[in-house]
Image (cartoon, helix red, strand yellow):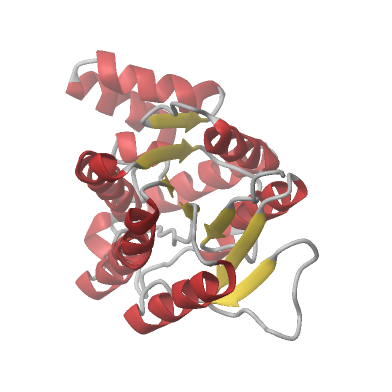
C-alpha cells in the first residue's frame, strides 16, 4: 500500500509565485491547499484547492488551518509565501504603512506557524518553508522596509528552526530574486513623494522596472520548493537568483560596508 500524499498549505496561492508553487506541487501528486484573501469558493483552480485566508487576521488564519486539518487530518508542509512589496524613500514611508508591511510579511507567517505547529508537533514531523527574498541580505534603496521585513523573517525563521527541531519539524528559508509576477503593480506606495527624494526614487523605479522585464519564470522557484520537500536534509537557506542578484549577496558578505554601499549607489543612481 502506497504512503498517503503529503498535505501542503501555500499562502498567497491565488497568483504569482504562490500559484506556480501550487500548480507544480499539485502536478506532482500532493494534496495542495492554496490561500488567498479573495478566494471564491465557487471558482476553484484546477488541481488544487483555494481557501480564503487573510494572514493579517488571527481568526481567518485559524479557520483556514482548522478546515484543512478537518478535511485531511494533518498538514505536512507549509509554504509561507503571502507577502507585500513597498516602494518609496524611507523618509516618505509613514509608520502606519510600515506597520502594514510588517503585519503581512512578518506577523503573517508567524500567525500561520502558530496555527500549524500544534498539529505538526502532534504528528512529530513537519516542514515549514518561509519565502523571504534576496533583499533580506541588504537594504535596497527605496525599498528599505521591504528589506527590513524580509531580514526580520529570516531571523525569525532561524530562531524558530532551533526551537522546533526537537519536535521533528524543519524550517527552511527560500530567498528568491526578481521573478516575472505582478508584484510591481501591487506594491504599497506612500501617499506623498517628497520633492527632495523624487529624482532618486524615479530613477530607482525605472531600473527596477527594467530588471523585472528580464526576470525569470516563477516555476523555477516552484521547482526549488518541490526539491526541498523531498530532500532528506534540506539546507537552512536557498538562494534562487541569477546574475547580479546572486553576485550581490556574495559581495555583501565579503566587501567592506561602505564599499558595498557605493556599489549600490552606482547601480541605482
Pinpoint residue 258: horizontal percent, then vertical percent: 19, 23
Front one among 194 and 222:
222
> Residue 40 appears in which quarter of the rendering?
bottom right
Front one among 41 and 249:
41
- Quarter of the image with the N terminus is top right
Q: Is residue 121 visible?
A: yes
Question: In the image, is residue 9 above or below residue 178?
Answer: below
- Quarter of the image with the C terminus is top left
> Residue 184 appears in which quarter of the rendering?
bottom right
Q: Is residue 109 visible?
A: no
Question: In the image, is residue 253 above or below residue 182?
Answer: above
Picture residue at 43% right of the left edge, 67% below the top: 188
Task: State left or right for residue 170 relative to residue 10.
Answer: left
Question: In the image, is residue 142 above or below residue 139?
Answer: below
Pinpoint residue 216: horizontal percent, then vertical percent: 66, 37
Picture residue at 58% right of the left edge, 63% below the top: 185
- Residue lying furthest right in this view? 46
Amino acid at each position: 500500500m502506497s504512503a498517503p500524499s503529503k498535505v501542503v498549505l501555500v499562502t498567497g496561492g491565488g497568483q504569482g509565485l504562490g500559484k506556480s508553487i501550487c500548480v507544480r506541487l499539485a502536478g506532482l501528486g500532493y494534496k495542495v491547499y492554496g490561500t488567498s484573501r479573495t478566494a471564491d469558493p465557487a471558482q476553484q483552480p484546477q488541481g488544487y484547492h483555494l481557501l480564503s485566508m487573510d494572514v493579517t487576521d488571527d481568526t481567518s488564519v485559524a479557520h483556514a488551518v482548522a478546515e484543512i486539518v478537518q478535511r485531511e487530518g494533518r498538514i505536512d508542509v507549509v509554504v509561507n509565501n503571502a507577502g507585500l512589496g513597498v516602494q518609496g524613500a524611507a523618509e516618505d514611508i509613514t509608520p502606519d504603512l510600515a506597520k502594514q508591511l510588517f503585519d503581512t510579511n512578518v506577523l503573517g507567517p508567524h500567525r500561520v506557524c502558530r496555527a500549524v505547529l500544534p498539529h505538526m508537533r502532534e504528528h512529530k514531523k513537519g516542514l515549514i518553508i518561509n519565502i523571504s527574498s534576496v533583499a533580506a541580505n541588504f537594504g535596497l534603496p527605496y525599498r528599505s522596509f521591504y528589506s527590513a521585513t524580509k531580514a526580520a523573517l529570516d531571523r525569525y525563521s532561524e530562531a524558530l528552526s532551533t526551537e522546533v527541531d526537537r519536535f521533528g519539524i524543519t524550517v527552511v528559508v527560500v530567498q528568491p530574486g526578481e521573478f516575472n509576477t505582478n508584484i510591481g503593480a501591487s506594491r504599497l506606495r506612500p501617499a506623498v513623494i517628497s520633492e527632495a527624494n523624487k529624482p532618486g526614487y524615479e530613477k530607482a523605479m525605472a531600473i527596477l522596472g527594467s530588471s523585472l522585464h528580464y526576470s525569470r519564470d516563477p516555476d523555477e522557484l516552484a521547482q526549488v520548493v518541490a526539491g526541498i520537500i523531498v530532500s532528506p536534509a534540506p539546507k537552512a537557506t536557498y538562494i534562487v537568483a541569477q546574475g547580479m542578484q546572486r553576485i550581490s549577496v556574495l559581495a555583501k558578505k565579503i566587501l567592506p560596508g561602505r564599499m558595498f554601499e557605493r556599489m549600490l549607489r552606482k547601480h541605482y543612481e
